[in-house]
Image (cartoon, grey):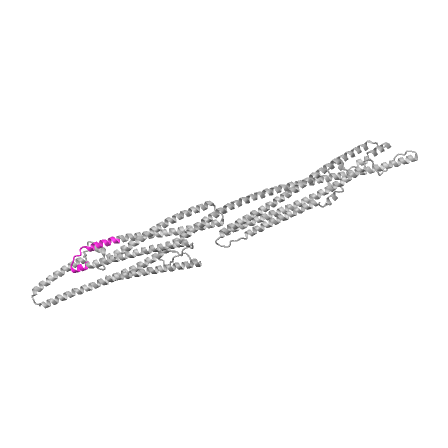
């Protein structure tokens, strides 16, 4: 017994030394982790399988980088957990020691019982109680093994569920990232994903609680199984000592088997020994007193020596059995301790893994919240920019429609002005023809008057009056009236080609005045400024599209910022183009006002000229009527004097010629102004088309880049 107590003390001391070594190893690991954190080395997370012997060499993962206060709190919690674990280990060791002491006591009691039986005491019916106890323990062992197997199956199912939930969480995080990059995820989808994540988190929490419960139950069942195994071993040893080795216990429980225990065998043997002693005594009495007292004494001494040798051999065998049992118990204890240490390491690794996963889940939740907020802000910005773009497109459509209508109106007005000018030119040509005819008539009348005067003078000198002779080549007023052009009879509807000055009026191009030259220069400068502004807008857009993210961790934020900058640049370019178009519209309005003023002035001048032409025509008509009323023959001097009274004044003719020259100059100036306006309109149209092409190119480039980014993301 002293040897067993010494071995137990040695085992306890070795366990304490192992615990000290473990503590030193943990301290060294913590120091190494701190050094690695200071250097900035990243460690890969360690996957720990729970309660599965895979021999993967798992190690504890380092704590996450936090502030000193948080790290100190975590260190305190870790130290408290280690203290609790050490207390649990000490309690278990005390329990093992108490169990060993109990086993030693039972062995001592059994030894005392065996000694008593050997000395001749009655053992009672102990084998039957031991057999019933063994049967009960075997049943309980089966039940506990079944519970352990069911717990293991539950553990496997729960681990599978946890893995599935982790996969779902990873898939949800990947979906959230993809929706954040594409910038098209609706708030309903985000809310649904959040609800699914909440449900999955609740399921994970419930499964974790179930895991903790099952692990605690498994530990309890394992402890109970170990206790029952120890009890079974003790009972089996007792039965082996009582019944013997290689005996079937179930066969012994049957009533048909007439098995007897060692106590019964010992009693039977004692009875036989007593019977044999009585028989020997009877034989000795019958044989007589042949032997001497010395021989009898020697015989008894040999018998006593034989009994003492047998007892010594029996004691040696018992000691050997005890040593073997203690060695087996020590080996089992060492194996259990090794299993316990492995399970403890795995449990610690699983705890650390759970902590790391919890921290990762928290960080992912924070990132998801931040990304959701950013996504909402980005959606609002995108909606605002889309609304602005739609408004700008509507304004562009309205301006294009207005400009088209304005161009149509201008073209119609230009055509009207051209037709009016053509009509005016036709009228002027007709008036010129009439004036030329009148001049011819006036010259003919003047020649006739001169001839009449010459004849009179000759008559006065000769003393007699001779008849008036007319030259055959000269035409009378009636002939002149008959030789009028068809335009005078048919109205003022001839073309410009009938006038002799038509080609000269079209061919002569008047130079623009100083005000018109300044106006044209201002238009050209405005066109150049607008073109340079559009080029600057394009450069701004291109500069905005060149921006690229610098780091991989901020790709989403940089992509969103790049899109915002692109939208802003597009808006700025559209605003610049809108301002330029408004300036162009104002310039066109000013031109229209000036053209309308010129048109009103030309109309007023045309009305005046028409009135004068009407008056001249009236005078010519009166002159023709008077010329028709006088007879051809027998004209007197009075008639000639009356005709001389109707003769137009040369001053009036000069005034008419001056007015005609003025009208011609004005018509030529109007033609040149129309040509300049047409050229300016053509330049404005070209400039407007260039602006529209540039805007289309800018918007197409922005759309292509946006589509390419969407395809790449």
Q: Which stretch appears magenta?
A: 113-138
Name the magenta segment's main secondary structure: helix
- The answer to if 132 sits in the magenta stretch is yes
Q: Position of residue 493 (x, y in %)?
A: 73, 37
Count the marks: how many?
Answer: 0
Taking the spot 92% from the left edge, 35% from the top edge, the residue there is: 462
Residue 44 sits above or below residue 587 on the image: below
At a point 56% along the width and 47% down the height, the residue shown is 571
Q: Position of residue 407 (x, y in %)?
A: 64, 42
Judging depth in this view, the residue of 490 and 253 nearest the camera is 253
Q: Is residue 273 above or below residue 144?
A: below
Horizontal side of 517 relative to 330 (left or right) equals right
> Is 461 displayed left or right of 309 in the figure?
right
Location of residue 401 (image quadrant): top right
Residue 440 position, x and y percent, is 81, 38
Q: Quadrant of residue 18?
A: bottom left
Which quarter of the image is occupied by the N terminus? Answer: bottom left
Can residue 545 be seen here? The reply is: yes
Above-or-below relation of 446 to 137: above
Residue placed at 31% from the left, 59% from the top?
337
Can residue 632 be found in the magenta stretch?
no
Q: Provide residue 15's location: percent of width, then percent of height.
A: 31, 60
**Given the current orientation, which residue lies at the most extreme front position?**
69
Residue pushed farthest right? 463
**Residue 490: quarter of image:** top right
Residue 327 appears anywhere in the view: no
Q: Which of the two residues, 635 or 647, is positioned nearer the viewer here?
A: 647
Q: Nearer the viewer, residue 382 or 463?
A: 382
Asked if residue 267 lies left or right of residue 609, the reply is: left
């Amino acid at each position: 017994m002293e040897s067993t107590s010494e071995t137990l003390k040695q085992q306890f001391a070795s366990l304490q030394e192992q615990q000290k070594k473990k503590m030193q190893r943990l301290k060294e690991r913590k120091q190494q982790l701190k050094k690695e954190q200071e250097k900035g080395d990243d460690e890969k997370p360690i996957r720990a399988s729970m309660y599965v012997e895979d021999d993967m060499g798992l190690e504890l993962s380092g704590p996450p980088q936090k502030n000193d206060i948080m790290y100190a709190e975590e260190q305190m919690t870790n130290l408290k957990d280690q203290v609790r674990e050490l207390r649990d280990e000490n309690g278990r060791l005390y329990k093992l020691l108490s169990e060993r002491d109990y086993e030693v006591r039972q062995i001592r009691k059994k030894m005392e019982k065996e000694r008593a039986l050997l000395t001749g005491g009655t053992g009672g019916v102990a084998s039957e109680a031991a057999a019933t106890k063994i049967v009960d323990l075997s049943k309980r062992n089966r039940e506990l093994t079944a519970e352990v197997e069911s717990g293991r199956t539950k553990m496997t199912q729960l681990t599978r569920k946890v893995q599935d939930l982790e996969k779902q969480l990873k898939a949800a995080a990947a979906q959230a990232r993809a929706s954040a990059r594409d910038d098209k995820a609706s708030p309903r989808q985000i809310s649904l994903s959040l609800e699914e994540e909440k449900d999955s988190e609740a399921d994970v929490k419930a499964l974790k609680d179930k895991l903790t419960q099952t692990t605690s139950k498994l530990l309890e069942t394992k402890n109970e199984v170990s206790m029952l195994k120890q009890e079974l071993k003790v009972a089996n040893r007792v039965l082996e000592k009582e019944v013997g080795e290689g005996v079937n216990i179930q066969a012994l429980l049957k009533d048909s088997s007439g098995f007897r225990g060692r106590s019964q065998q010992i009693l039977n043997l004692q009875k036989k020994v007593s019977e044999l002693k009585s028989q020997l005594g009877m034989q000795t009495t019958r044989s007589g007193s042949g032997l001497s007292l010395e021989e009898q004494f020697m015989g008894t001494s040999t018998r006593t020596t034989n009994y003492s040798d047998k007892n010594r051999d029996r004691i040696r065998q018992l000691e050997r059995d005890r040593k073997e049992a203690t060695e087996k118990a020590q080996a089992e204890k060492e194996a259990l301790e090794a299993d316990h240490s492995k399970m403890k390491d795995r449990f610690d690794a699983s705890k650390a893994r759970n902590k790391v996963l919890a921290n990762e889940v928290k960080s992912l939740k924070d990132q998801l919240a931040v990304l959701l907020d950013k996504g909402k802000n980005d959606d609002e910005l995108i909606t605002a920019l889309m609304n602005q773009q739609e408004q700008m497109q509507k304004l562009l459509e309205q301006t294009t429609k207005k400009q088209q209508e304005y161009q149509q109106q201008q073209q119609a007005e230009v055509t009207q002005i051209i037709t009016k000018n053509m009509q005016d030119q036709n009228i002027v040509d007709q008036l010129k023809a009439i004036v030329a005819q009148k001049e011819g008539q006036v010259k003919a009348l003047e020649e006739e008057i001169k001839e009449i005067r010459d004849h009179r003078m000759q008559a006065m000198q000769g003393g007699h009056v001779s008849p008036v002779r007319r030259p055959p080549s000269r035409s009378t007023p009636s002939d002149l009236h008959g030789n009028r052009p068809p335009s005078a009879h048919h109205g003022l509807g001839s073309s410009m080609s009938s006038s002799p000055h038509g080609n000269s009026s079209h061919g002569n191009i008047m130079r623009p005045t100083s005000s018109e030259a300044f106006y044209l220069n201002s238009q050209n400068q405005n066109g150049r400024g607008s073109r340079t502004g559009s080029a600057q807008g394009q450069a701004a857009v291109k500069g905005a599209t060149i921006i690229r993210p610098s780091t991989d961790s901020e790709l989403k934020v940089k992509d969103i910022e790049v899109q915002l900058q692109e939208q802003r640049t597009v808006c700025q370019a559209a605003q610049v183009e809108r301002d330029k178009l408004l300036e162009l519209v104002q310039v066109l309005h000013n031109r229209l006002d000036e053209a309308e003023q010129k048109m009103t002035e030309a109309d007023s001048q045309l009305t005046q000229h028409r009135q004068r032409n009407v008056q001249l025509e009236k005078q010519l008509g009166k002159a023709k009527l008077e010329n028709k009323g006088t007879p051809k023959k027998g004209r007197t001097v009075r008639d000639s004097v009356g005709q001389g009274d109707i003769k137009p004044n040369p001053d009036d003719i000069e005034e008419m010629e001056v007015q005609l020259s003025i009208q011609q100059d004005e018509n030529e100036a109007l033609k040149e102004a129309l040509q300049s306006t047409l050229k300016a309109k053509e330049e404005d149209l070209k400039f407007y088309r260039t602006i529209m092409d540039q805007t289309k190119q800018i918007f197409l480039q922005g759309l292509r880049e946006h589509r390419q980014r969407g395809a790449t993301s």
